[in-house]
Image: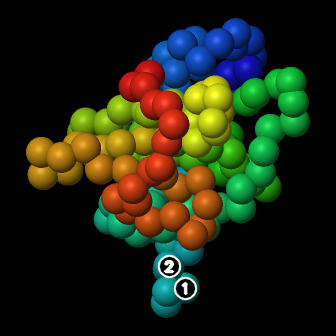
Amino acid sequence: MVMTTRTVIPLHDKKETGEAMYNICYAYHRDLQRIMLKTGAGGITPLSEIPLESYYDFCRRIPYKEDKRPIEVIGRPLELVRLSGMDCKKKSVMMGSYASLKRIPFRFIASSNRPSGEIHHVYPELLINGKWTTYDATYSRYYIGMNKRTTAKEVL
C-alpha cells in the first residue's frame, strides 16, 4: 500500500513496489526541506541541509519496525517521519528521496540472504565517485558501504 497525502494504492508485487518507491522519491523529495532536525546547540535545520553521512545516520537510528502482514506500506517522507519506526522499504525511500533531492544517482536492490533465494529485503545503493555504494539504513548496526551477503539480488 502506498500512502500519499490523500491516496492509498495497493501494491501487488516487488515490481509495483519498486516503481512506487522510485516515484515517491522523485515526486516528494522536497518533503526533506520541510522536516526539521534538532541540532547540537538547540538549533534546527531541514533534513535537506545536512550532509549525506549525517542523513544516513539519522535514518539508521530510526527504530526498525516491520509492517503488519499482509499489508506492506510505503509513503512519502513527510508521512514516514511521523511513524514510530520504519522497515527496509520506508528507510530506502528516505535514502532515495535524499539522493533524488541532491541529484545523486541511486537504485534500489531487492535481495535475499535465505537459502531459497526468496526476496525479502530492499536497500538503496548510491553512485558515489563512480561506484555503487550500499546505503542500507535498516538497522542501527549497519554502515555505509557494508558488504551485503546475499543468496539473490536484483535491481528494482
Q: Label 2, on which residue?
A: 39
Asked if 139 appears above or below 30 in the picture, the reply is below
Residue 75 in the image, given as x and y percentages of width and height = 64, 31
Amino acid beneath label 1: Gly
Q: Label 1, on which residue?
A: 42
Asked if 89 appears above or below 91 in the picture, the reply is above
Amino acid beneath label 2: Thr
Q: Quadrant of residue 2?
A: top right
Residue 140 in the image, given as x and y percentages of width and height = 59, 67
Residue 92 is tagged as none
Identity of the residue drawn at 36% across and 32% down: 107
Distance between the alpha carbons at the discs numbered 2 and 1:
6 Å
Identity of the residue drawn at 56% across and 74% down: 38
Q: Is residue 70 left or right of residue 50?
A: right
Q: Residue furthest left?
A: 130
- Tell me if label 2 and label 1 are in contact, CB under 8 Å: yes
Q: How is the image coloured?
A: rainbow
Is disc 1 surrounded by few (<14), some (14 to 19) or many (20+) residues within 10 Å?
few
Identity of the residue drawn at 54% across and 85% down: 42
Q: Secondary structure at mark 2?
A: loop
